[in-house]
Amino acid sequence: MDNFIRYIKATRAEMRHVSWPTQRQTIIYAALVIAISVLVSVFIFIFDQLFITGLGFIGISL
């Protein structure tokens, strides 16, 4: 039990050193993650459609 208490105290001490982002930064970062995720999914969708179309031209159906 002593090890657990020491662990909790050390964790709390380390958490005081963390530089937490502001609410505005958090919102901006979240919006960036969502935007990049949408762009990557659109990019993958376009190349998937091109790949399927290309396979159709050579006679391979999926």
Image: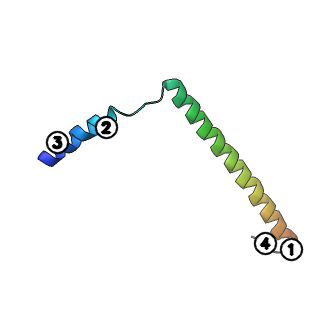
Name the spot of residue 59 as percent of width and height, x first. Answer: 85, 75
Q: Nearer the viewer, residue 45 or 18?
A: 18
Q: Earlier in the sequence, mark 1 or mark 2?
A: 2
Instruction: Say what amino acid the circle numbered 4 marks.
Output: Ser
Q: Which residue is mark 1?
A: 58
How far is the residue under mark 1 from the one under mark 3? 67 Å
Instruction: Say what amino acid the circle numbered 1 marks.
Output: Ile
Q: Which residue is mark 2?
A: 14
- Mark 1: give few (<14), some (14-19) or many (20+) Cα within 10 Å: few
Q: Which residue is mark 3?
A: 5
Taking the view exactly as shown, the residue that stands out farthest to the bottom is 59
User: Does any portion of residue 42 appear in the rendered image?
Assistant: yes
Name the spot of residue 42 as percent of width and height, x first. Answer: 72, 48
Instruction: Say what amino acid the circle numbered 3 marks.
Output: Ile
Q: Residue at x 22, y 44 (%)?
A: 7
Are the residues at dot 4 and dot 2 in contact (C-beta closer than 8 Å)? no
| Between marks 4 and 2 in the image, the one whose residue lies nearer the viewer | 2
Q: Residue at x 86, y 74 (%)?
A: 58
